[in-house]
Amino acid sequence: MAQVIGLGGVFLKFQNPEAMRIWYKDVLGMAPNAYGVLFEFNGDTHPTKGYQLGTFEASSDYFGDPNQQAMLNFRVDDLETFKTQLEAANVTIVDAIESYSYGKYLHIEDPEGNRIELWETVDSEFEKVGDAMPMK
């Protein structure tokens, strides 16, 4: 049987796609191209290669603006340091860093108001909780 074997990309609409490619490059360190920005999942340094397809209630306010239908979640290597860099770049920080046994989370917004979730994993704990990871 044929099946999904991985994530090919995440697609978002922007008012100014070119400016957003530059922002994602300059602020988040992603490689821009003619179609958007490229990112590698976990690179070669993290053993966990799983992707999460989050399923949220249509009424959830977790994405911020009720009109936002999708949210990116990026893994980061040092959330505390990255938060300092983001503040220096005048990025909108939505909330405080939240810590759980399986990682830390922080929400930011890009210049067009799209909420982005940043996640510093604790891979050993994440692998333990697996399917039992609590709902947010």
Image: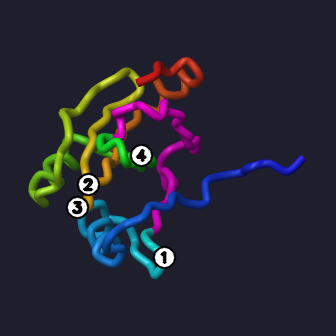
Q: Which residue is mark 1?
A: 35
Range of residues picked out in magenta? 38-63
Residue 121 in the magenta stretch? The answer is no
The answer to whether residue 17 is left or right of residue 8 is left
Mark carried by residue 58: none
* Image-quadrant location for residue 49: top right
Residue at (30%, 44%) from the top-left corner? Answer: 65
> Which one is nearer the viewer's eye here, 135 or 29?
135
Circles 2 and 3: CB atoms closer than 8 Å? yes
Q: Amino acid at mark 1?
A: Tyr
Image x and y of residue 2, in percent: 85, 51
Density class for disc 2 (Cα within 10 Å; few <14, some 14-19, many ≥20) is: few
Image x and y of residue 48, in percent: 55, 40
Foreground mark, 1 or 2, reads: 2
Mark carried by residue 73: 4
Instruction: Residue 48: tell me if it is visible.
Output: no
Q: How much space separates mark 4 and mark 2, taking CA atoms?
A: 15 Å
Q: How much space separates mark 4 and mark 3, taking CA atoms?
A: 16 Å
Precedes in sequence: disc 1 or disc 2: 1
